Amino acid sequence: MSGNQLRLYRDFSMHCGTLPDTHMHKHGAMIFVLSIGGQCQVELASSGRTCCRNALIDGGIKHRLLTAGEPVLAMYIESYHPLAIQLRRRYLPCSGVAFDPLTTPQSNAILSRQDPMSALLDHLSAIAGTGIISVTSSTRSTGIEDKRIMRALTLADQGVTLSHSSRIVHLSESRLSHLFSQQLGISYQHYRLWRQAKRFLHALPPNGALTRYALDAGFSDGAHLSNTFRKLIGISPSEIVGSYASITRQH
């Protein structure tokens, strides 16, 4: 996967390049994937495979991506972000997946730009009507209005359990779990694990020691890390480490 690029920000993660075919997994964030070489296949656990040029998949939707070795442009948008909320309302009112929401001319225009990752973000932002988005902002941008859920987001980022968070925000576990899933499309536990995986990626240097950084990110051991990545991203961390020619990180 030489030549691959990865950009990691607080609210976004962006990939440009090849990916191995994934295992069945479900992200803790919304993902938009655009095939650079032609078509790819998205296999849903609930309804089989669909060939497409691009797809929007909400967090918590179990799927696998089959690219046949063709490069893809992928953008992960945290579920709380205004862009994710607007795209969910526009494209995913009844289901968690939209196939080919972008036309072929729109896709080609994005891929023809010098920086297709930024072009994709600009295009999705224009569609959603969210205005100019700064991916490098260190301040969380959110479309969540419920202050209790906002507080729960911060606690989940810190690795706080659902039971502990429920006491802090003065809600029962079941009520917090329901509101969290209702407003973000994913469970509290799934979001907390997703953010833990992102902490690992932000901290990991190229060709770094997996176990050391797994422990720093809160994983019990290397096996726990690998199992988590297969469930969340569909590939193992060893398939990520050393696969990127360029990595940009900003918390």
Image (cartoon, rainbow, N blue to C red):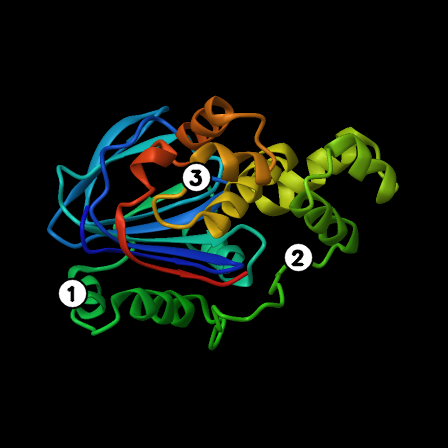
Dot 2: few (<14), some (14–19), or many (≥20) neighbours within 10 Å? some
The location of residue 143, given as percent across then percent down, is 62, 61
The answer to whether residue 139 is above or below residue 233 is below
Residue 245, position as x, y percentages in the image: 25, 56
- The 10 Å Cα crowd at callout 3, few under 14, some 14 to 19, many 20 or more, is few
- Report helix, strand or loop for mark 1: helix
Mark 1, Cα crowd under 10 Å, few <14 / some 14-19 / many 20+, is: few
Q: Between tags 3 and 2, which lies in front?
A: 2
Residue 174 in the image: x percent, y percent? 76, 29
In the foreground, 172 or 199: 199
Q: Are marks 3 and 2 in contact (CB under 8 Å)?
A: no
Say which amino acid is labelled 2.
Answer: Ile
Labels 1 and 2 touching (C-beta < 8 A): no
Q: Is residue 104 above or below residue 26?
A: below
Q: Is residue 92 visible?
A: no
Residue that badge 2 annotates: 144
Residue name at image x 13 percent, y 40 percent: 69
Name the residue at 36% across, 31% down.
236
Question: Mark 1 vs mark 2: which is more N-terminal?
Answer: 1
Q: Which mark is residue 95?
A: 3
Q: Amino acid at mark 3?
A: Ser
- Residue designated by label 1: 108
Q: Secondary structure at mark 2?
A: loop
Q: Secondary structure at mark 3?
A: loop
Q: Nearer the viewer, mark 3 or mark 1?
A: 1
| Residue 177: quarter of image | top right
Q: Disc 1 residue type? A: Asn
Q: Earlier in the sequence, mark 3 or mark 1?
A: 3
For marks 3 and 2, the one nearer the N-term is: 3
CA separation in Å, label 3 and label 2 = 20 Å
